[in-house]
Amino acid sequence: MTELLESSQSVLVKYSLVTAFGVVGVTVWFSYYLSGRLTRGRLHGSAIAILIGLVLAYVGGVSTGGKKGIADIEVLSGIGIMGGAMLRDLAIVATAFGVRMDEFRRTGISGIVSLLTGIFVSFAVGACVAWAFGYRDAVSLTTIGGGAATYLVGPVTGSALGATSEVMALSVAAGLIKSILVMTMTPFVAPHIGLDNPRSALIFGGLMGTTSGVTAGLAATDPKLVPYGAMTATFYTALGCLMGPSVVYIAIRAIV
């Protein structure tokens, strides 16, 4: 029995990426099962899967004392590759192929306005919350504001401006909270804001910006809208990373 376990472990470690796909597949299946049984689909399975992933990342980090969450466990090290930037960006870019360009062009100026409004409002709200908690320097305010935009924009902005690791961690936490709120609340608010067509999905993605949250929320609302929301949400992240350390930082520095 011991030899069987050791040989199985060596195989799982050797083919760690395949192991990661298997673990994630089982997690997603279980999440959709819980979604159907406990919430009758009101809370999307992808949202539950992300919550489970966050819990497992915390447990993995605490149990191993490492910095990569569940990926610090040798058997599950492939999750660090699967969840890395390369495959993540590939998945995001792949959604663009489901977009009909005539629908995208039809959005016109409203799509651009939604992008700029979403970015500046998120930075402003994040900076105000940071100010309320005692942060007074422009670097910290901008970094935490970037986290309120998305959990990617915060660290990018903080790295460019030389923010402390504590502040960058707070920016990531702010972005994760926003992502979870967007993905879980979208199906509930969609009927009240007319989120039922490609044009509104494009504008919604531009206003919210968090690609993971928008994608999961729209998947629970109408899977056909996912590529449109993901398209502008991706632009949002790119613009946030560009404008955070430059335009937004200069504006906040001038104010404080």
Image: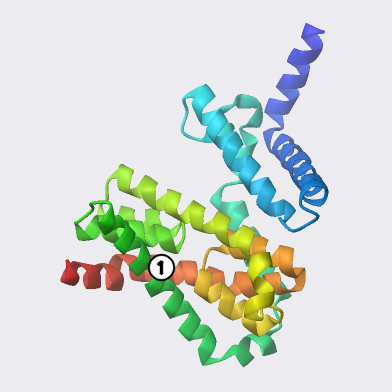
Above or below, 35 against 222 in this view is above
Residue at x 50% of width, y 52% of height: 176
Q: Quadrant of residue 161?
A: bottom left
Above or below, 142 against 115 in this view is above
SS class of the residue under badge 1?
helix
Residues 113 and 3: in front is 113
Residues 218 and 184: in front is 184
Q: Would you say 98 lies left or right of 156 here?
A: right
Circle 1 Cα neighbour tier, 10 Å, few/some/many (<14 / 14–19 / ≥20) = many
Residue at x 26% of width, y 58% of height: 131
Q: Would you say 25 lies left or right of 175 here?
A: right
Quick check: can you spot residue 94? no
Q: Position of residue 149 (x, y in %)?
A: 43, 64
Task: Residue under label 1, please give it.
Answer: 122
Q: Position of residue 44 (x, y in %)?
A: 72, 56
Quick check: can you spot residue 256? yes
Residues 92 and 27: in front is 27
Screen quadrant of the C terminus: bottom left
Outermost residue on the top side: it is 2
Screen quadrant of the N terminus: top right
Q: How many marks?
A: 1
Q: Would you say 238 lies left or right of 88 here?
A: left
Residue at x 66% of width, y 81% of height: 194
Residue at x 60% of width, y 79% of height: 202
Above or below, 160 against 30 in this view is below
State the scheme by which the image is colored: rainbow
Q: Amino acid at mark 1?
A: Ser
Q: Position of residue 85 (x, y in %)?
A: 54, 52
Q: Position of residue 242 (x, y in %)?
A: 38, 69
